[in-house]
Amino acid sequence: MSDYRYLFPFEKIRPGASVIIYGAGTLGQEYLKQLLITGYCKVVAMADRNYEKYPDMAVPVISPDAIRDFGYDYIVIAIRVQIAANEIFRILHEQGVPDEKIICVFERDVESINVFAGTTSDTDDSTKQDHSSSMAILISGGLGDNIIQKRFVTEVIRFAPDISVDIFSIRNADYLRYLYSDVSNVKNVYEDLGSRYDSSCHDYGIAMAIEACRYVRIDEIKEDVLSEKYAGLLPRLKKVRAEAELEKISISTPVAVPNNIRRYRGLNAYNGFNYNDAFEINDKVVNIPITERGEAFAASLNLTDYYTVNFGTGECADPSKVAKMWRQERFEKVVSMVKESYPDMVAVQLGARDAIRLSGVDEFVLGEPMENVASVLKGAAFHLDIEGGTVHMASQIGTKCFVLFGPSVEEYYGYEGNENIKAGKCHGCYGLLPDVNRCARDMAEPECMALITPEMVFEKIDLFLRNDRR
């Protein structure tokens, strides 16, 4: 075993203790393997929000809600980076787990390790075929990242128009199947709950990992097989690999490092994937599929003049843990001001199924598949949101967005056709800390968001509805 940077936290657990491992993915499986080998302590279960998708393991894989039903001395959190830690702590506290029983150790200070080392594989026979002329792509990141990544993927395919592509997704597999439904080269989208990509990537002629909007890692190029067939693509991928090796960006590098390097070079989240002109991305254009099912859903709402608003925090259910959040009452104030001036305009809230419902909203479209959301966004007069995945989707569809920018870097993630709203002088700290959602100044309500008032936002919306919209 060569990966000691993510060793089980033996030093914090007494021998023979009973533990539940929170997180059944690659690292959780590695922890389990270490404990099965050493017998150091007893694993009574593994908890994961996607517990139903995991195959049988040596111990039960349970829902976080079932933690109360098990006896344990410690809950050991198995995550590589701190991004998700706040949300996991919140879930455990809801289950009555005291802080002293929660153990969480992130990256250890060692060198020359493989960040993506794994153990148990969740492959099936479909990934064991002959893929020597195909491409495998491991995709991670949020919904907005996935849209930006699609621009890079389609650029790669442009230089190999007949190449077959398999996508591996740590999350968002269903969303990616929809997002790439218009790209005929993409044959499969596999859920990667453990180390599926790791175990099969070297069977492919080309294999790469795309980590959010941070970096590309080239894991395989079979030049002897593909040099003649894809002569236009391979030199470009080799240049990406060389440039990436010079940058030395990895999963443990703060998000702000690669983002700011690109920003100071005059690049953004899209053309940052060019890697010193290895590719030729000169726009921010990504096709969002508009499907018959999505159009039928939007039509069933029977809406005419309406706008959309999203109030959510992605995977983190506690808004206080997300620095770019705008207070609920401020969203509600804008909704109220629009209603007062435009009483016939319907407010439609988008978001996750369990999103907090804003008062004053007329229609709720929560927990719907993204193909339905896309069609609803397409018919909206405008969309109101913080910077995030729904903004990226609406912007690609052509719906004007009023976007509240605080910690997110406007120059990196913004679209020129939107109203990107900022206030004050402190902006753009996203990703400076390991917990990317945290304000770099540790402010309970970051100044960058607190200084944006409902009146500022409504003034821009009102101007658009009275003049620009015509």
Image (cartoon, rainbow, N blue to C red):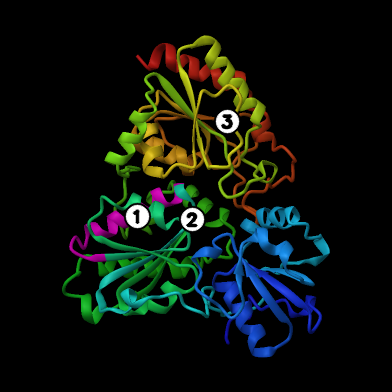
Which amino acid, by three-letter code, is at mark 3?
Answer: Lys
Real-space Cα separation, disc 1 to disc 3, in angstroms: 34 Å
* Residue occupying image coordinates x 65% and y 37%: 426
Secondary structure mostly seen in magenta is helix
Camera-side mark, 3 or 2: 2
SS state under label 1: helix
Q: Position of residue 192 (x, y in %)?
A: 45, 67
Which amino acid, by three-letter code, is at mark 1?
Answer: Arg
Camera-side mark, 2 or 1: 1
SS state under label 2: loop
Q: Is residue 350 left or right of residue 32?
A: left
Please name whichever residue, 92 or 70, is drawn nearer the observer in this view of the structure: 70
Mark closest to the chain's N terminus, 2 or 1 = 2
Residue where numbered disc 1 is placed: 177
Which amino acid, by three-letter code, is at mark 2?
Answer: Gly
From where the camera sits, is residue 334 visible? yes
Real-space Cα separation, disc 3 to disc 2, in angstroms: 25 Å
* Residue occupying image coordinates x 35% and y 43%: 284
Quarter that holds the C terminus: top left
Give the numbered dot on residue 141. 2
Q: Position of residue 418 (x, y in %)?
A: 43, 30
Q: Is residue 463 left or right of residue 36?
A: left
From where the camera sits, is residue 290 visible? no
Instruction: Work out whether 234 lies above or below 372.
Output: below
Instruction: Work out whether 209 lies above or below 31.
Output: above
Residue where numbered disc 3 is placed: 422
Which region is colored magenta? 144-164
* Residue occupying image coordinates x 44% and y 48%: 269
